[in-house]
Amino acid sequence: MTRAAALLLCTALASPALAADPAAVVATYADIAAAGYGDSLTTAQALQSAVEALIATPSESTLTAARAAWLASRIPYQQTEVFRFGNPIVDDWEGKVNAWPLDEGLIDYVDPGYGVNEENSLAQLNVIATPKFTLSGTEIDASQITPAFISGTLHEADGIEANVASGYHAIEFLLWGQDLNGTEPGAGNRPFTDFLQGDGCTGGNCDRRAAYLKAATDLLVADLEYMAAAWAPGGEGRATVTADPQAGLLAMLTGMGSLSYGEQAGERMKLGLMLNDPEEEHDCFSDNTHNSHFYDGLGIRNVYLGSYTRVDGSTVSGPSLSDLVAAADPAVDTRLRAELDATVTALQAIKTAAEGGFAYDQMLAPGSAEGEALIMAAVNALVTQTASIDRAVTALGLTQISFEGSDSLDNPGAVFQ
């Protein structure tokens, strides 16, 4: 054997070991988190500018532009949801930016008779029309709607999770209004005149509605600045997950499995189908749920393959979990890669159908065989890939993980109790 041939053989033998370095794999994961949250921040800043333009000059065009900016901001953010469940810094923060569903009557006017909730006395508060109210026996001054008021007083008031006052979905509600179409096609239809100051104002309190929209958007940007910094070099999220590569791998797999199973397959998809309830849609006001589901699934695959495509078209990639699992058990890696692809394909089928005129609302309708087939194909694919994520844990010799569950999957009878 020539020296050159021996060198080539040595390089070929060394490649799997290099590709399967846990520290490098976790570093890629942190890089993808930094890129994803960075893109979420920049698209939220674009939304902030669009909201400011809407408030300054309310019109059909500025409202349409603000809605488009909101939709664009969801694409990178949904791909970051896979960083939940395994990273406490994300789990402790996530409820500020993406909590759902919300009792929208807490924030603004709703359809008469809507939102009566015996378990939530604030479900019909309409803080936009209520500059003073009582919370736990204390009178609250809501005359100034600021980011601090939303985050410190109103969000999850009285410890009730449905009192969502901040984040993407509060902004979504203010831009679209209620979706009153049930399981028929159509999103919310808030008029731009809800933001007109003075003559022509609809819905009442247009000045306070504009103030709330601005404060909620400014707060979202501030929250995303925090998380983007946490994953940048020297940030707390990056430092924590990279300090112990084995723990970092567990965080990666925990996020993948819990989002796949209990959160997306269960709470976000099968539960809504079981209840035939469009209120269970993730992006219910904008009818954007098909995209929300798709980009969640894509985010799971991103983490396994160690690659993320940024909003500017560039790619962040490096050594991956796939490399690591392939070195330990090639069959498990091959199977999981195929199943992740199958899930993205099933979610793409929902996205394609919705964009072709078959709204996700309609898919949830009682008796919609086509809708049930589309949704359950994705649910089943997510459940299937979760089993292989568990196989990957075993292949890597890691501590077994308990993934998030859902009654809709684990105890369906309890859903109707």
Image (cartoon, helix red, strand yellow):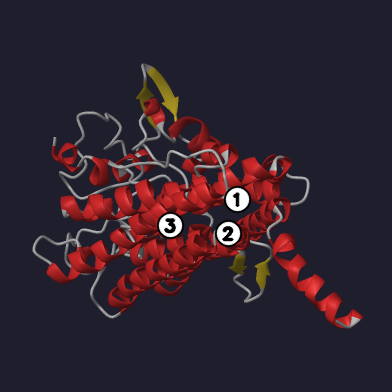
Q: Which residue is mark 2?
A: 40
Identify the element where label 2 is drawn. Answer: helix
The image position of residue 326, as x and y in percent, is 58, 62
Mark 2 or mark 1: whose residue is earlier in sequence = 2
Circle nearer the N terminus (2, 3): 2
Query: Badge 3: few (under 14), some or many (20 or more) residues near its Cα, within 10 Å?
Result: some
**Residue 197: mark:** 3
- Quadrant occupied by the C terminus: top left
The residue shown at (74%, 61%) is 18
Residue at 34% across / 66% down in the picture?
290
Type of amino acid under label 2:
Ser
- In this view, the residue farthest toward the left is 367
Q: Amino acid at mark 1?
A: Leu
Q: Secondary structure at mark 1?
A: helix
Q: Is residue 372 left or right of residue 172?
A: left
Q: Tell which of 259 and 290 is nearer to you.
A: 259
Q: Which mark is residue 123?
A: none
Residue to which mark 1 is pinned: 224
Does residue 191 lie above or below 267 as drawn? below
Toward which corner of the image does residue 245 lie, by quadrant? top right
Give the residue drawn at x 19%, y 29%.
118
Circle 2 crowding by C-alpha within 10 Å: few under 14, some 14–19, many from 20: many
The answer to whether marks 2 and 1 mark residues whose Cβ atoms lie closer than 8 Å is yes
